[in-house]
């Protein structure tokens, strides 16, 4: 079949099966934007000196809604009143559509959609009139739809960071206390360890999981959140020292208590030093960490076990250019590295690198463009037993921030040798994110 024929079939599947809902969101929002583009409420009036000036005769409800932070608005002022009292409510809904070319498992084409909901309540103890420095969060999540990785791609890094079996669960519940004027923080409860450890601000919007969670780190992360404790000590604004201990057998859909104390999965320990230098106005984040999992680890291809597993990692991002007068816009580069013992880990080394630019297109200051490469190198034992060499994921995305509460993100990933031994494939994705 010709290249044009393949392209036609891919786009047909994508538009027929999974794009319509995202397209509706996009079209309806663009209609709203055009509705207030020429605001007729602006009228000419005379100033005190007798000259003409433009003035808004009355507030535009539509414009206020589109420029607000939430699709449901301020609830007639109720949301602002709650936030003034330290109660923050938020719900986000994410729609991911994806289609893949031939390659991967079975050399088949495939299309799928995933629908991900997240509702949270965040409490600020000081604003509530209780005590200083305290906060608490309860977070519910659910996932529906189909993940292409298990049946169509076979990639070990995970083309979609929301990918998981269907679930509805209490995702997080934690308490956090800040002490000594913010120098010390203690956070305990069921949580996503990636929020406190390993993550980089410049990789947050990549869809491939490995750009957020280094592929061989074994760290509890969403949706496999874990009961545990995370601590931070900041001796200066340029240095953070972190330590965390979590349930070593975190599982999606579980409360956390039934696995944290069953003595089967052990515990997961992680320590990290974060340096935050600023050179001539260019900020950087440099993370150096190590982890240890106390559960027994089986030697690949054998029945022998080790009494634990460990690894080290590096993750860094550096701003190299920012636009004049606005440090929030500009170019950041990043790099990642992870290493773990090759006899007990499928992936013994991981390498990641790339760049993120915010505000690349003129007058689109909140849009974001990213390109990155993640390389998962399989251990020599995996190569001998399963002919696995390395998996390389190359991703390019452009996040279009239509309003503060709605974003559309086209995404392209080329996955070379998924799982180290499958045929290469290309995944076209579209992510829509709406905040209520």
Image (cartoon, rainbow, N blue to C red):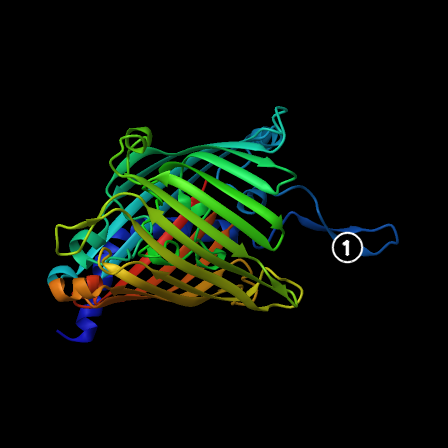
Outermost residue toward the bottom? Answer: 2
Residue denoted by label 1: 53
User: SS at mark 1?
Assistant: strand
Asked where in the image residue 130 lies, by quadrant, the reply is top right
Q: Describe residue 258's horizontal placement relative to residue 365 as left or right.
A: left
Q: From the top left corner, tell me how far across and down residue 102 is, in percent.
A: 17, 65
The residue lying toward the viewer, choosing from 245 and 95, is: 245
- Pointer 1: residues within 10 angstroms few (<14), some, or many (20+)? few
Q: Is residue 426 left or right of residue 192?
A: left
On the image, the x and y values in percent for residue 157 come to 28, 57
Instruction: Name which residue lies at 59% across and 47% down.
Output: 234
Looking at this view, is 61 or 359 the one in front? 359
Foreground of the two, 118 or 161: 161
On screen, 309 above or below 129? below
Q: Position of residue 179 (x, y in %)?
A: 61, 36
Q: Is residue 427 left or right of residue 72?
A: left
Task: Looking at the picture, tell me which residue is in the foreground, 305 or 137.
Answer: 305
- Please tell me in which quadrant of the rendered image residue 394 appears: bottom left
> Residue at 25% across / 61% down in the picture?
342
Total residue callouts: 1
Asked if residue 191 is positioned above or below residue 365 in the image, the reply reads: above
From this viewpoint, which residue is outermost toward the top?
Answer: 130
Residue 101 visible in image: no
Residue 320 occupies quadrant: bottom right
């Amino acid at each position: 079949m010709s290249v044009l024929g393949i392209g036609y079939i891919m786009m047909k599947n994508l538009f027929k099966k999974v794009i319509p809902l995202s397209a509706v969101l996009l079209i309806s929002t663009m209609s709203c934007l055009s509705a207030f583009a020429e605001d007729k409420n602006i009228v000419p009036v005379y100033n005190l000196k007798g000259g003409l000036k433009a003035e808004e005769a009355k507030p535009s409800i539509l414009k206020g809604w589109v420029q607000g932070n939430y699709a449901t608005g301020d609830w007639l002022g109720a949301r602002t009143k709650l936030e003034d009292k330290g109660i923050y409510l938020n719900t986000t809904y994410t729609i991911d559509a994806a289609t893949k070319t031939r390659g991967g498992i079975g050399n088949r084409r495939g299309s799928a959609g995933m629908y991900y909901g997240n509702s949270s309540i965040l409490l600020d103890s000081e604003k509530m009139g209780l005590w200083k420095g305290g906060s608490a969060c309860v977070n519910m999540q659910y996932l529906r739809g189909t993940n292409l990785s298990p049946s169509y791609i076979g990639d070990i890094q995970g083309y979609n960071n929301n990918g998981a079996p269907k679930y509805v669960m209490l995702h997080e519940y934690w308490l956090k206390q800040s002490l000594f004027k913010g120098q010390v923080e203690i956070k305990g409860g069921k949580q996503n360890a990636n929020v406190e450890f390993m993550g980089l601000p410049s990789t947050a919007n990549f869809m491939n999981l490995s750009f957020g969670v280094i592929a061989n780190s074994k760290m509890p992360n969403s949706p496999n959140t874990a009961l545990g404790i995370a601590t931070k000590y900041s001796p200066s604004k340029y240095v953070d020292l972190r330590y965390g201990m979590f349930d070593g057998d975190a599982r999606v859909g579980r409360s956390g208590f039934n696995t944290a104390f069953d003595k089967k999965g052990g515990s997961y320990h992680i320590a990290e030093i974060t340096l935050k230098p600023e050179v001539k106005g260019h900020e950087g984040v440099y993370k150096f960490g190590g982890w240890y999992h106390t559960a027994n680890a089986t030697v690949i291809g054998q029945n022998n076990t080790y009494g634990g597993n460990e690894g080290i990692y590096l993750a860094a991002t550096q701003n190299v250019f920012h636009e004049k007068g606005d440090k929030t816009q500009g170019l950041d580069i990043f790099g990642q590295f992870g290493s773990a013992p090759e006899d007990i880990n499928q992936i013994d080394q991981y390498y990641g690198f790339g760049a993120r630019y915010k505000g690349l297109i003129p007058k689109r200051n909140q849009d974001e463009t990213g390109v990155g490469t993640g390389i998962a190198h399989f251990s020599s034992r995996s190569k001998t037993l399963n002919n696995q060499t390395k998996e390389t994921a190359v991703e390019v995305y452009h996040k279009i921030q239509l309003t503060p509460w709605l974003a559309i993100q086209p995404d392209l990933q080329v996955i070379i040798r998924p799982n180290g031994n499958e045929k290469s494939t290309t995944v076209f994705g579209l992510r829509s994110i709406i905040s209520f």
